[in-house]
Image: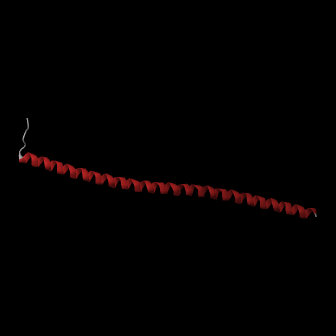
Amino acid sequence: MIVGLSSGVTLAWWIALGIGLVVALVVAGLLELLRRTVHQIDRGVSDLLTVGGRLAQNTWTIQLFRTTNLHAHELKEELRRHARAERSDE
């Protein structure tokens, strides 16, 4: 048995399908916008982590320079003591 639809019902179905298509396109556009935004945030966070890692490495390097400087001063004082001891032995 075939049921015939009136032209008003057919028109309503076409309008509903059109609205559904528009909604689907809007949702797809918003999802693409969200994907691009998330990608930009991911790049920003990645860059920030890279810079943070470099900063931590530089901070450690500065500490190593301080330690090296301290040892250099100790070595300099030791050399002065040896020089004074050699002069007093002469």
Residue that sits furthest to the front in the current view: 1
Q: Residue at x 44, y 56 (%)?
A: 43
Decide which of 60, 89 is in the foreground and name it. Answer: 60
Please tell me which residue lies in front, 58 or 25. Answer: 25
Q: Is residue 42 positioned above or below 80 on the image?
A: above
The quarter in which the C terminus is drawn is bottom right
* Residue at the (6%, 47%) spot, across then down: 7
The answer to whether residue 43 is left or right of residue 76 is left
Q: Is residue 61 left or right of residue 11?
A: right
Q: Residue at x 67, y 58 (%)?
A: 66
The picture places residue 52, in percent across and down from the top left corner, at: 53, 56
In this view, 60 is above or below 90: above
Front position in the image: 83 or 41: 41
| Residue 64: percent from left, percent from top | 66, 56
Indicate whether 29 appears above or below 88.
Answer: above
Image quadrant of residue 33?
bottom left
Residue 32, quarter of picture: bottom left
**Screen quadrant of the N terminus:** top left
Outermost residue on the right side: it is 90
Q: How many marks?
A: 0
Colour mapping: secondary structure
Which residue is rendered at x = 81% and y = 59% of the image? 78
* Image position, residue 87 (x, y; %): 90, 64
Locate residue 65 relative to residue 41 in the image: left or right: right
